[in-house]
């Protein structure tokens, strides 16, 4: 159970760091790109970030479920 709590906090810290990095990338793209390229690049970055977070949350939820049913 303690390992699961540690994993959750690692996920949360990773999520915050990744969100900060993605936010910086998006700001750089907005500053340095042509207007036509901004939406595609931003959508791509946000989609990639969401997929990474979904995978991490599925792992955490699976571990919780697995521990509760064992």
Image (tube, rainbow, N blue to C red):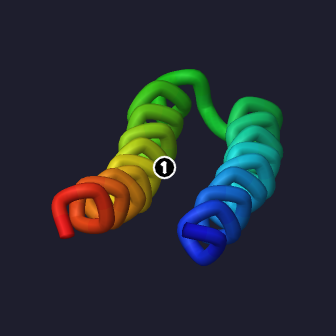
Residue at 55 percent across and 68 percent down: it is 1
- Reading the image, the residue beneath label 1 is 49
Quadrant position of residue 69: bottom left
Callout 1: helix, strand or loop? helix
Q: Residue furthest bottom?
A: 3
Q: Residue furthest left?
A: 69
Q: Which one is in front, 26 or 6?
A: 6
Residue at 48 percent across and 49 percent down: it is 49
Residue at 60 percent across and 76 percent down: it is 3
Q: Return the x and y of residue 23 as percentages of the image width and height.
A: 75, 39
Crowd tier of the residue under label 1, counting other residues whose Cα lies within 10 Å: few below 14, some 14–19, many 20 or above = some
Q: Which one is in front, 63 or 53?
A: 63
27 above or below 51?
above
Q: Return the x and y of residue 55 as percentages of the image width and height.
A: 33, 59
Q: How many numbered discs?
A: 1
70 above or below 52?
below
Quadrant position of residue 18: bottom right
Q: Return the x and y of residue 64 as percentages of the image width and height.
A: 35, 57
Task: Assign the C terminus to one quadrant of the image.
Answer: bottom left
**Residue 48 visible:** no
Residue at 66 percent across and 39 percent down: it is 33
Q: Which one is in front, 25 or 6?
A: 6
Left or right? Give the position of 31 relative to 6. right
Left or right? Give the position of 31 relative to 58. right
**Residue 54 visible:** yes
Q: Return the x and y of residue 50 as percentages of the image width and height.
A: 41, 43
């Amino acid at each position: 159970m303690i390992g699961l709590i540690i994993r959750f906090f690692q996920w949360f810290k990773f999520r915050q760091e990744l969100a900060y990095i993605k936010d910086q990338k998006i700001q750089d793209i907005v500053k340095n790109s042509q207007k036509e390229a901004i939406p595609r690049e931003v959508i791509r970055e946000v989609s990639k970030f969401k997929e990474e977070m979904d995978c991490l949350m599925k792992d955490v939820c699976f571990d919780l479920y697995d521990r509760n049913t064992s």
